[in-house]
Image (cartoon, helix red, strand yellow):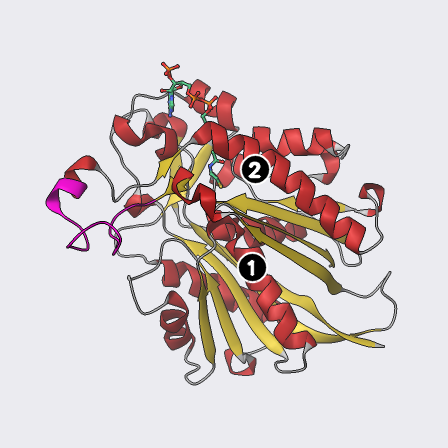
């Protein structure tokens, strides 16, 4: 018998405002054809003006708690992965904790962008395996729409991202039969900061000059994400293949042993290329990018929630999840659902 962590409940929150590619083409020099062909994205969802990242997270968290059969008061820690926090500080985990009404428990923000959820999962898994906590909430939530450049200057980035939240409750479990019992096998985390400026938001920031942000920087659009799309694409394909292989090798598993691949959703072509290079049959890869765009840290838990709802992900299945994002950061997790 081994003490491990397992996913006890999952949930998501998708805002109600649907934004199609044609909607974007009303104010950006872009087209449905270009976006679909280059990325696979057909639509995304944006929040209403008064909705925040922690608002979306709260809905996803409550659904995950309900599915786990737990109350918020059963949680001992909240890990919140986001690149679009409610405020510069304090961390959004604190705002979510207040909304969940559980003062006193640990609240931690993770700033690893598209890889943030897997970084969070890894931290939660270790706390549980060490016997410190029994139930940890891991949330990925993003409100991109308020921080995108809605002029042609930012069209390469703006068409890619959507808003949303996903959450899992990770709980302590006793594993007697690793080939049957739900549990996290391992997580593998990486980063290479030499590429930090290939996908980043420069301002506001303390590294720029005498002020947090200047009017000149705002006029230049430095508060919006800047991306070297081709470089991100190439690194994403290579790193996701490497980190999936690393996870499988660590657990003495082969690609054929995996029932379900939960990849981050940045670009359909990235995932198709990864599947092709690793010889993964298309039906084992669950994609949601058509519906939601790239929801960064929220992507993987949103995908898991949909896959369970659509009966594609079933109890006992072996899952390999991988993500790549700004930092550059990349990670994988192998788990039995
Ligand atoms: N609509 C129409 N045209 C656009 C456009 C848009 N939204 N964005 C860029 N273009 C134009 C470019 O200006 C360029 O025009 P030019 O040939 O006249 O100079 C042309 O389309 C091709 O641009 P390019 O950047 O070479 O396209 P690409 O094939 O590399 O695709 C991405 C661009 C962004 C879709 C692709 O690089 C990508 O997905 N990269 C990974 C991004 C990512 O995953 N980011 C999140 C990381 S987690």
Report the residue at 75% width, 54% height from top: 314
- Element marked by disc 1: helix
Q: Quadrant of the C terminus?
A: bottom right
Report the residue at 42% width, 22% height from top: 32
Report the residue at 62% width, 52% height from top: 304
Local crowd size for mark 1, using a 10 Å CA cut-off: few (<14), some (14–19), many (≥20): many
Start and end of the magenta stretch?
201-217
Q: Quadrant of the N terminus?
A: bottom right
Q: Where is residue 316 in the image (x, y as percent from the top left)?
A: 80, 58
Viewer-proximal residue, 235 or 155? Answer: 235
Tell me how far mark 1 sits from mark 2, CA to CA: 16 Å
Residue furthest to the bottom in view is: 104
- Quickly name the residue at label 1: 119
Q: In which quarter of the image is residue 138?
A: bottom right
Relative to 127, is 163 above or below? above
Q: Position of residue 113 (x, y in %)?
A: 46, 51
With 28 as the anchor, is 123 left or right in this view?
right
- Quickly name the residue at label 2: 236
With 131 as the anchor, is 102 left or right in this view?
left
With 148 as the anchor, is 13 left or right in this view?
right
Q: Is residue 62 visible?
A: yes
With 308 as the anchor, is 182 left or right in this view?
right
Give the quadrant of ligand 1.
top left
Q: Is mark 2 within 8 Å of ligand 1?
A: yes
Report the residue at 64% width, 71% height from top: 126
């Amino acid at each position: 018998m081994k003490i491990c962590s397992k996913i006890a409940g999952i949930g998501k929150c998708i805002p109600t405002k649907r934004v199609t590619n044609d909607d974007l083409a009303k104010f950006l020099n872009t087209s449905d054809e270009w976006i679909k062909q280059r990325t696979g994205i057909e639509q995304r969802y944006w929040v209403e003006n008064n909705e925040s990242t922690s608002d979306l997270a709260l809905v996803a968290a409550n659904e995950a708690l309900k599915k786990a059969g737990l109350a918020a008061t059963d949680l001992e820690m909240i890990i919140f992965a986001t690149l679009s926090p409610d405020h510069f500080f304090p961390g959004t985990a604190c705002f979510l904790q207040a909304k969940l009404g559980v003062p006193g428990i640990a609240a931690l923000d993770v700033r690893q962008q598209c890889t943030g959820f897997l970084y969070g999962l890894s931290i939660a898994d270790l706390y549980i395996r060490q016997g410190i906590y029994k139930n940890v909430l891991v949330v990925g939530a993003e409100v991109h729409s308020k921080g995108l450049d809605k002029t042609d200057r930012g069209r390469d980035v703006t068409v890619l991202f959507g808003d949303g939240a996903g959450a899992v409750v990770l709980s302590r479990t006793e594993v007697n039969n690793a080939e049957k019992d739900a549990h996290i096998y391992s997580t593998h985390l990486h980063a290479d900061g030499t590429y930090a400026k290939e996908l980043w938001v420069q301002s506001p920031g303390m590294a720029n000059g005498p002020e947090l942000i200047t009017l000149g920087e705002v006029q230049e659009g430095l508060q919006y994400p800047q991306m070297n799309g081709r470089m991100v694409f190439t690194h994403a394909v290579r790193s996701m293949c490497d980190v999936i292989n690393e996870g499988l090798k660590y657990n003495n598993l082969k690609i054929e042993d995996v029932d379900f691949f939960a990849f981050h959703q940045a670009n359909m072509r990235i995932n198709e290329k990864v599947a092709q290079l690793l010889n993964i049959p298309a039906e084992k890869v669950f994609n949601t990018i058509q519906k939601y765009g790239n929801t960064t840290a929220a992507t993987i838990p949103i995908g898991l929630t949909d896959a369970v709802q659509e009966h594609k992900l079933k109890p006992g299945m072996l899952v390999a999840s991988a993500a790549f994002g700004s930092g550059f950061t990349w990670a994988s997790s192998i788990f039995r659902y």
